[in-house]
Amino acid sequence: MSLLKFKAVSEPANSNPNDGAKRKILDFGNGSDVIYIQRFLPLDQSWKWFDYLDKEIPWTRPTIRVFGRSCVQPRDMCYVASPGLPELMYSGYQPHAYSWDDYPSLRDILDAVHKALPGSSFNSLLLNRYKGGNDYVSWHSDDEKLYGPTPEIASVSFGCEREFILKKKPSKTSREKNGEPVGKRLKQNICTDQHSFTLKHGSLLVMRGYTQRDWLHSVPKRAKPETTRINLTFRHVFL
Ligand SMILES: O=C(O)CCC(=O)C(=O)O
Ligand SMILES: [Fe+2]
């Protein structure tokens, strides 16, 4: 489905402080890019962390509000944050902020992410658990003000592989400016401005620059039954 308009740049293993993992940098244009490292963490260590997270994290499946309606979020979640940060509020739900000290393995994973992304300083973490193919995250962008205009969001995946899709937000103003028929341009958006990744066990995907401003992302439902997937998104909240 994804037509790769961008050029993927693979850096040689030894230019990367992260032990031999190859990184692909995908330039989406207009200041948005995504880094993908398929073998970010060793597989055996990743399975140990998967088991730990699956068992130890106090997962909840909150009731949220979407378009004015209450519904149960179609995945489990948990939130971890450094002390002193403003409360997170999303879809009318305010998750409890757990401490990094409560779950020492999270610090180890955070250290690995910081090492791979020099200059990064993540202070919050949203954990998601997809218990099967029916669990999903719908189209959204993580463009909350508290993450700043160009947030770096680092996403580590464990367990079942799932599709992660990015699609360009329709830009009404640029269509109008170009004087193009809206219908024609929209069709083009659907076909070309979409990129899909199969997020592997132990992988790291990083969204940078204007990716949250200009792109939406989702993990769609799967028709066939799937095993559990756990995803960690590290973010920096500005005080
Ligand atoms: O599970 C994923 O890969 C993405 C999760 C996500 O987009 C989010 O938590 O905002
Ligand atoms: Fe997201």
Image: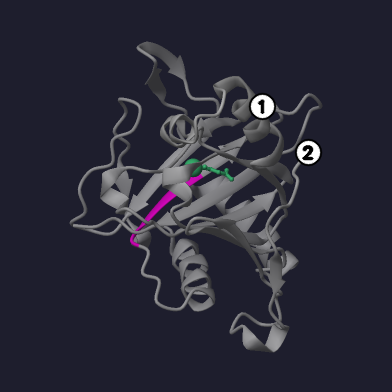
In the image, 108: left or right of 187? Answer: left
Q: Is residue 86 visible?
A: yes
Q: Is residue 131 visible?
A: no
Mark 2 is surrounded, within 10 Å at the Cα level, by few (under 14), some (14 to 19) or many (20 or more) other residues, namely: few
Residue pointed to by mark 2: 1
In the image, 178: left or right of 95? Answer: right
What percent of the width, then of the height, locates residue 15? 64, 87
In terms of depth relative to the viewer, which is nearer, 22 or 170?
170
**Residue extending furthest top?**
69
Residue pointed to by mark 1: 187
Residue shown at 68%/79% (left/top)?
11
Could you tell me which quadrant the N terminus lies in?
top right
What percent of the width, then of the height, locates residue 211? 48, 50
Residue shown at 47%/61% (left/top)?
106
In the image, 177: left or right of 221? Answer: left
Could you tell me which quadrant the C terminus lies in?
bottom left
Labels 2 & 1 near each other (Cβ < 8 A): no
Residue shown at 74%/65% (left/top)?
43
In this picture, which residue range is highlighted in magenta? 123-127
Q: Amino acid at mark 1?
A: Lys
In terms of depth relative to the viewer, which is nearer, 100 or 116?
116
Residue shown at 67%/33% (left/top)?
188
Up-down relation of residue 23 to residue 15 (above or below): above
Picture quadrant of residue 139: top right
**Residue extending furthest front?**
179
Dot 1: what SS? Answer: helix
What percent of the width, then of the height, locates residue 210? 43, 53
Which disc, if any, is residue 213? none
In terms of depth relative to the viewer, which is nearer, 28 or 111?
28
**Which of disc 1 and disc 2 is earlier in sequence?**
2
User: How far is the residue under mark 2 from the one under mark 1?
Assistant: 14 Å
What percent of the width, then of the height, locates residue 155? 54, 55
